[in-house]
Image (cartoon, grey):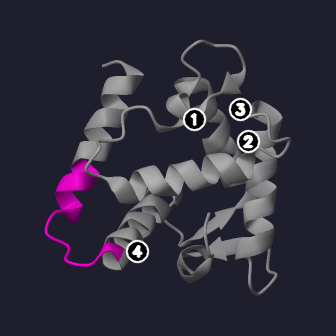
Amino acid sequence: MKAANRLLLALLTLSALGAGMPALAQEKADFRAMYFNRLDQNKDGFLLLEDLQRIAAKEFRRIDADQNGRLSLDEYTFGIPGERQDAIDFFTARFQRSDFDGDGQVDFNEDQAYCVDFLARADANGDGRISRDEFLGVGGN
C-alpha cells in the first residue's frame, strides 16, 4: 500500500472515530489525544525528544513527495480529509511554527528543531519528557 494511501486510511479512521463530536473544542482535544497515542509508540505514556525526532524524520521522508528535502504546506497536509478541519488546522499550525526562516517551506533541520521547540514548550515539569496531559496542555502546536 502506498504511503499516501496509508496516511489517507489512517486519517479516515481518525475521522470515523471523531464523527458525531458536538463541539469543535472536543474534536480538537480528541484529535490531539489520538495523535499523542500514535506518537507514544512504546505506550509508556511519555514522549522523549528522541521519539519525536525519530518519528518526525520518518514522516518527513515519507511526505516529501518531490524528494527535494523541503516540505510545502501542500505536502505537509496532503491526504487529510477536508472534513477533518481539526487535523488540517493542527498540521497547518505545526507547519507554520516549523518554518523558522519564514520562507514558506520546512526543511529537515527546521522539522527536527520544531521537536526541540515543542519539547521545551510542553515539558511543564522539566523532566525531559512529555506526558499526555502536558501534550494536550500546549497551546497551539
The question of residue 140 being in magenta is answered with no
* Amino acid on which disc 1 is placed: Leu
Q: What number is the disc on residue 59?
A: none
Which one is earlier in the sequence, the residue at label 3 or at label 4? 4
Q: Nearer the viewer, mark 4 or mark 1?
A: 1
- The span picked out in magenta is 13-24
Which quadrant is home to the C terminus? Answer: bottom right
Which one is earlier in the sequence, the residue at label 1 or at label 2? 1
> Residue 118, percent across and down?
73, 63
Camera-side residue: 113 or 38? Answer: 113
* In the image, farthest residue toward the front: 103
Where does label 3 land, which residue?
A: 105
Mark 1 in CB contact with mark 3 (< 8 angstroms): no
Where does label 1 land, which residue?
A: 73
Number of numbered discs overlaid on the protein picture: 4
Question: Image quarter for residue 135?
Answer: bottom right
